[in-house]
Every structure is written in structure tokens, then in C-alpha cells.
Image (cartoon, rainbow, N blue to C red):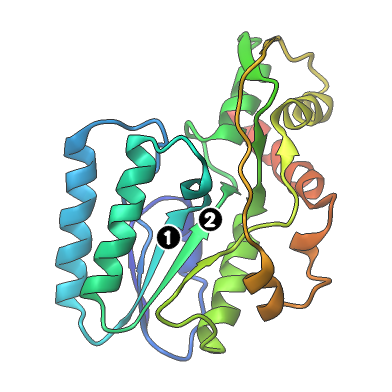
């Protein structure tokens, strides 16, 4: 039986993970990419060390971030890199999955929830013209993790589970605006960063025609979840 650590979006959906080998799934930890408090980083480090030591017989599954590929190494990015090193050092068997922006039904400060809530409440936003984001459905995260774990693909390695195409943040906002049928109040600024994700490894593991590799995949993710997020954000 899998041991799930955490109570957020990823952890709640990982209870549906059906694996041949029992796993320790660490879904808890720092989720705010703007976090800078050392106390929060230390809290996750202590959690990871304690749960791995308490479950030595289990294969460890840890979720990191694809944003480690960005040129701006924020405190959050450096922390996630350090946690990757910790997991790979402490665990006997491990799989580290780097994720992009995971979308699901959750009312928090993550990107898509923030945009939906801001548009619904007519709150002005500042949008970076050069910013891009990769979006993935939480259900696809579970589906792909289950396949990788049961096929033993990528054991004791770091893999990125991410779509092939990133979407401009301005396009994401405009699509959410259209789905909500509410004008988005925003100011465009000439800034923002995009980063690439090496998808060759995950494409070799999955079929090349897997839906997450479609150019319009991000549109379908928003079409599915924005109406649901509207119901909990009003």
C-alpha cells in the first residue's frame, strides 16, 4: 500500500495511484514559487529526511519543479534542487518527477486559481509579455506517474512530466477571460521569462501521440477546469 504525505492537490489525487510496488509519495512541502522564508525550506527538508528514514522499504516518489530550468535561480528553485539531492541521497529507490504548472480544482494562490479569482473579482493584474507557462492536468500527472512507476522507467533518475508546448501567459489569461465571459483587467509589462523543458525522455516512455504533447493541450486543460474553479472562487 502506498504511503501519501501531504494534503494538497497532488497528494489528494495520488491516493488514486495504483502501483505494483509500494511507494512513499511525498506531495507535501513548499508549493509557493515565491517563497523566500528559510524556515519553510527547512521544514520541508526535515519532513523529507524523517519520512524517508521511517519508510526505508518503500520506493520514494518526490515532486520537484520544471522551473529549475529557468535562468533566474530563485530561493525556491535552489531549494527544490537541494531537495532533489536529498531524496536521491537518502532513498534506496527513488523517482523524482519535475512538474510544470499543475491544474486542478483547488482554491489557492497558484497561477490558474489566481487568474480565475482575479478576473471574477475584477481585480487588476500585471501580466508579463514575455512569460510562458506549461500547464498539465493533475489527472494526467497521476496517469503518467502510474505508468512510469509500474514500467520501472526512470528508476533512480529525475524525469520531467510536462507537455511539449508552453503557452504565453497573456494567451492563458485571455482564454480564461473568454471562458468566464468577463473582461480581464490587466497591464502588460515588457518582462517575463520562458524556459525550455527537455521532453525527449518522457516522449520515449509514452506514445508520441499522447494528448499532453498536442499543441492545443493547454487549451483543453483550461476548458476543463476554469468552469469548475469558477464555482469555488465566487
- Density class for disc 1 (Cα within 10 Å; few <14, some 14-19, many ≥20) is many
Q: Residue at x 21, y 79 (%)?
A: 55
Q: Is residue 234 visible?
A: no
Quadrant of the image occupied by residue 144: bottom right
**Which quarter of the rendered picture does the C terminus lie within?**
top right
Q: Which residue is mark 1?
A: 63
Q: Nearer the viewer, residue 194 or 133?
A: 194
Residue 113: x and y in percent read 58, 33
Q: Residue at x 56, y 80 (%)?
A: 148
Q: Secondary structure at mark 1?
A: strand
Q: Is residue 197 visible?
A: yes
Q: Secondary structure at mark 2?
A: strand
Question: Is residue 80 shown above or below 228?
Answer: below
Question: Is residue 185 shown above or below 154?
Answer: above
Q: Nearer the viewer, residue 190 or 231?
A: 190
Residue 194: x and y in percent read 63, 37
Of the image marks 1 and 2, the number of the one nearer the N terminus? 1
Q: Which residue is mark 2?
A: 99
Q: Residue at x 23, y 72 (%)?
A: 89
Q: Are marks 1 and 2 in contact (CB under 8 Å)?
A: yes
All told, the count of numbered labels is 2
What whole-number distance in Å separates the C-alpha atoms at marks 1 and 2?
7 Å
**Which quarter of the rendered picture does the N terminus lie within?**
bottom left
Question: Is residue 14 shown above or below 227?
Answer: below
Quadrant of the image occupied by residue 119: top right
Amino acid at each position: 500500500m502506498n504511503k501519501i504525505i501531504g494534503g494538497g492537490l497532488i497528494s489528494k489525487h495520488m491516493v488514486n495511484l495504483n502501483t505494483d510496488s509500494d511507494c512513499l509519495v511525498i506531495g507535501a512541502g513548499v508549493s509557493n514559487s515565491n517563497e523566500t522564508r528559510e524556515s519553510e525550506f527547512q521544514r520541508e527538508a526535515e519532513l523529507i529526511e524523517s519520512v524517508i528514514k521511517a519508510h526505508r522499504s518503500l520506493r520514494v516518489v518526490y515532486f520537484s519543479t520544471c522551473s529549475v530550468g529557468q535562468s533566474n535561480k530563485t530561493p525556491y528553485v535552489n531549494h527544490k534542487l537541494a531537495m532533489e539531492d536529498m531524496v536521491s541521497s537518502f532513498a534506496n529507490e527513488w523517482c523524482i518527477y519535475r512538474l510544470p504548472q499543475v491544474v486542478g480544482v483547488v482554491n489557492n494562490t497558484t497561477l490558474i486559481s489566481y487568474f480565475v479569482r482575479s478576473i471574477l473579482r475584477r481585480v487588476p493584474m500585471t501580466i508579463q509579455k514575455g512569460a510562458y507557462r506549461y500547464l498539465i492536468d493533475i489527472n494526467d500527472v497521476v496517469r503518467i506517474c502510474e505508468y512510469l512507476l509500474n514500467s520501472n522507467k526512470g528508476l533512480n533518475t529525475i524525469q520531467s512530466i510536462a507537455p511539449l508546448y508552453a503557452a504565453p501567459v497573456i494567451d492563458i489569461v485571455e482564454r480564461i477571460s473568454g471562458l468566464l465571459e468577463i473582461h480581464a483587467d490587466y497591464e502588460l509589462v515588457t518582462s517575463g521569462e520562458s524556459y525550455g523543458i527537455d521532453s525527449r525522455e518522457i516522449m520515449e516512455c509514452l506514445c508520441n501521440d499522447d494528448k499532453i504533447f498536442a499543441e492545443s493541450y493547454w487549451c483543453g486543460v483550461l476548458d476543463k477546469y476554469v468552469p469548475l474553479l469558477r464555482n469555488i472562487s465566487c
